[in-house]
């Protein structure tokens, strides 16, 4: 029972005081073991999150996607902030990375694409599509 009180304080990081006189050695050992498990699990999760961010940054680049969005002429039909230009294009935004990749690949292949987009799609590289998807997924 005493180790639960100690665990509560240790996990909240307010203070970590051990009352050796009222706790048995086993209770203290169990408490330290649980704190170590929580700590190692936290570091594992943080490491995985950093690794996943690094993998995504190697495959796609937000800045390049933003520059490509302007230089390839996407702003002409879709506007600077992804809003539709009246009578000319559809609104873009609120896509996940995978949704944006799928939509861009389909449009570049001519599926449901405006004729202007088919011309652009004939000259675009896969890296540019990944960059555009990264940009659109963060709008």
Image (cartoon, rainbow, N blue to C red):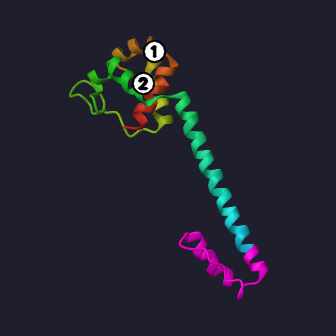
Residue segment shown in magenta: 1-29
Say above or below: 90 vs 8: above
**Residue 133, position as x, y percentages in the image:** 45, 30
Among all residues in the image, which is located at the extreme bottom? 22
Quarter of the picture holding the C terminus? top left
Alpha-carbon span between mark 2 and mark 1:
13 Å
Say above or below: 109 vs 41: above
**Residue 76, position as x, y percentages in the image:** 27, 21
Mark 2 element type: helix
Say above or below: 129 vs 6: above
Which numbered disc flags the more N-terminal residue, 2 or 1?
Answer: 2
Tally of numbered discs: 2
Magenta stretch containing residue 115, yes or no? no
Among all residues in the image, which is located at the extreme right? 26
Nearer to us: label 2 or label 1: 2
Quarter residue 110 falls in:
top left
Quarter residue 33 falls in:
bottom right
User: Which residue shows up at 25% across the image and 24% down it?
Assistant: 88
Residue with the mark numbered 1: 124
Label 1 neighbourhood size at 10 Å, few (<14), some (14-19), many (20+)? few
**Residue 97, position as x, y percentages in the image:** 48, 36
User: Which residue shows up at 38% across the image and 40% down it?
Assistant: 94
Relative to 16, is 81 on the left or the right?
A: left
111 or 56: which is nearer to us? 56
Q: What is the number of the mark on residue 64?
A: 2
**Residue 71, position as x, y percentages in the image:** 34, 18
Mark 1 element type: loop
């Amino acid at each position: 029972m005493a180790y639960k009180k100690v665990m509560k304080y240790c996990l909240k990081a307010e203070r970590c005081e051990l009352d050796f006189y009222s706790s048995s050695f086993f209770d203290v050992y169990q408490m330290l073991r649980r704190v170590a498990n929580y700590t190692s699990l936290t570091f594992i999760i943080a490491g995985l999150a950093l690794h996943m961010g690094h993998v995504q940054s190697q495959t796609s680049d937000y800045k390049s996607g933003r520059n490509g969005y302007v230089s390839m002429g996407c702003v002409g039909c879709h506007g600077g902030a992804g809003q539709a230009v009246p009578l000319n294009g559809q609104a873009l935004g609120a896509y996940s990375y995978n949704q944006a990749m799928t939509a861009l690949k389909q449009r570049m292949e001519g599926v449901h694409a405006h004729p202007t987009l088919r011309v652009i799609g004939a000259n675009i590289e896969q890296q540019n599509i990944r960059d555009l998807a990264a940009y659109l997924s963060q709008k």
